[in-house]
């Protein structure tokens, strides 16, 4: 007489812990290997020059223009005609060694900025730099 003992079958289940582990590793891998920079940027290293001169000029004029169109020369307020005279004086004294650094507010009218650029070009002051952020 054989007795039949019914065995309980285990319910089929899926262990999701290893799946979550693998997905976490994959997400971490993709986040670490992604590049979050724009495609239009250039990643360059300029060459070194042993014969390059000093980057700071001997004579430097700092011309500032605020939102209202007031001119400043080396942090002192100056009128437009006085600015013309000071640029002429610097051009006569130092010639092409003079560098004009132009600091203008972002809301400054374009006519004020182009005035300084135009006067500098008329006086052969070709080293004009625009300060940006």
Image (spheres, helix red, strand yellow):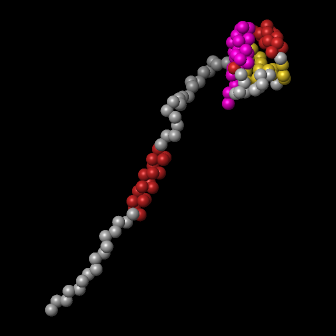
The residue shown at (53%, 29%) is 42
Please give left or right for residue 31 compared with residue 60 in the image.
Answer: left
Q: Is residue 52 left or right of residue 93?
A: left
Q: Name the residue located 60 percent from the left edge and 21 percent from the top edge.
A: 49
User: x, y percentage for residue 104?
Assistant: 73, 24
User: Residue 124 appears at what percent x and percent y?
Assistant: 71, 8
Instruction: For the N terminus, give its image quadrant.
Output: bottom left
- Given residues 62 and 46, the one toward you in this image is 62
Is residue 58 at all visible to an observer of this figure? no
For image coordinates 71% across by 12% down, the residue present is 118
* Residue with the most extreme left position: 1
Give the residues drawn in magenta, as a range. Answer: 111-133
**Up/down of 60 relative to 43, above or below:** above
Residue shown at 24%/83% (left/top)?
6
User: Residue 37, relative to residue 101: is it above or below?
Assistant: below
The answer to whether residue 51 is seen in the rendering is yes
How far across and down, in percent of the image, does residue 131 sit? 70, 25
Which quadrant: the C terminus? top right
Task: Please name whichever residue, 118 or 62, is drawn nearer the observer in this view of the structure.
Answer: 118
Q: Is residue 116 above or below residue 104?
A: above
Q: Is residue 49 magenta?
A: no
């Amino acid at each position: 007489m054989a007795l039949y003992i019914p065995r309980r079958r285990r319910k089929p289940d899926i262990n999701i812990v290893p799946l979550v582990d693998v997905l976490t590793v994959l997400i971490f891998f993709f986040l670490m290997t992604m590049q979050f920079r724009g495609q239009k940027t250039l990643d360059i290293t300029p060459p070194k020059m042993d014969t390059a001169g000093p980057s700071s000029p001997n004579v430097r004029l700092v011309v500032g223009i605020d939102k209202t169109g007031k001119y400043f020369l080396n942090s002192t307020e100056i009128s437009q005609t006085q600015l013309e005279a000071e640029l002429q004086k610097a051009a006569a004294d130092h010639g092409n060694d003079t560098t004009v650094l132009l600091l203008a507010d972002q809301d400054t009218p374009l006519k004020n900025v182009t005035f300084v650029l135009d006067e500098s070009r008329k006086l052969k002051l070709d080293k004009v730099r625009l300060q940006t952020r």
